[in-house]
Image (tube, rainbow, N blue to C red):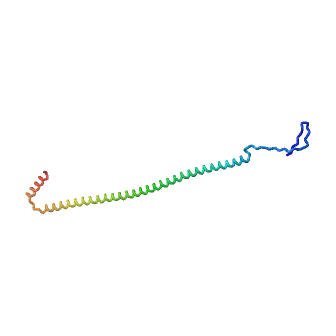
Amino acid sequence: MHVRGRSAVGAWSETRVPLKIRVTPPFWMTWWFRVGGGIALLGLVSAVFRARMLSLERRNRELESLQFAREKALLEARASQEALHGAYGRLRALTRQLEDAKEEEKRRIARELHDELGQLLSAIKINLKALGRLPERSEERASGLSTRSRSSTR
């Protein structure tokens, strides 16, 4: 750029002198600041990304451990349920055996009562027939009855 000047009296100079003006920009507009800012921004983005990834990995590990614990609890619950079903089946079988044993005991007692009663009735019938065949001796009967009544009172 060339400059021409005017004197105090108002006369213009005939020669043009080249003028060199150097404008120094503020530091935030320099190339080194912009490059440094870009690198810092990339570093910040990278750090935020890395922190987020670490957080997600930690959360993923927690979820995996919870999933493992859940699966373990489900397996234990299934095993417990199967054991409960097995115990219930054994209980039903024992109840069935108990009922069968009760019925068998009832039948045995009924047979014994029936047999004893039948034997007693048979014995009474035989004794009555035997008494009916004996000759009618009033003395023997009377003495037999009195002997029996005395022995039963003792």
Q: Residue at x 41, y 56 (%)?
A: 83
Q: From the top left corner, tell me how far across and down residue 33 is, in percent.
A: 71, 46
Viewer-nearest residue: 39 or 18: 18
Direction left: furthest residue = 139
Q: Is residue 44 above or below residue 120?
A: above
What percent of the width, then of the height, locates residue 39?
Answer: 68, 49
How many numbered marks does the figure carry?
Answer: 0
* Percent position of residue 81, x then y: 44, 56
Q: In the displayed structure, does residue 85 sit left or right of residue 38?
A: left
Give the vertical position of 79 relative to 25 (above or below). Answer: below
Q: Quadrant of residue 124?
A: bottom left
Q: Is 95 left or right of 46, judged from the image as shown?
A: left
The spot of residue 68 in percent (x, y) is 50, 54
Question: Is residue 38 rendered to the left or right of residue 77?
Answer: right
The one of 66 and 79 positioned closer to us in this rendering: 66
Q: Residue furthest top?
A: 9
At 48% across and 54% down in the image, what residue appears?
Answer: 72
Question: Relative to the observer, which residue lies in front, 102 or 151?
Answer: 102
- Is residue 99 shown left or right of residue 36? left
Which of the 4 quarters of the picture holds residue 132? bottom left
The structure residue drawn at horizontal position 24% and vertical position 59%, both measured from the top left corner, is 112
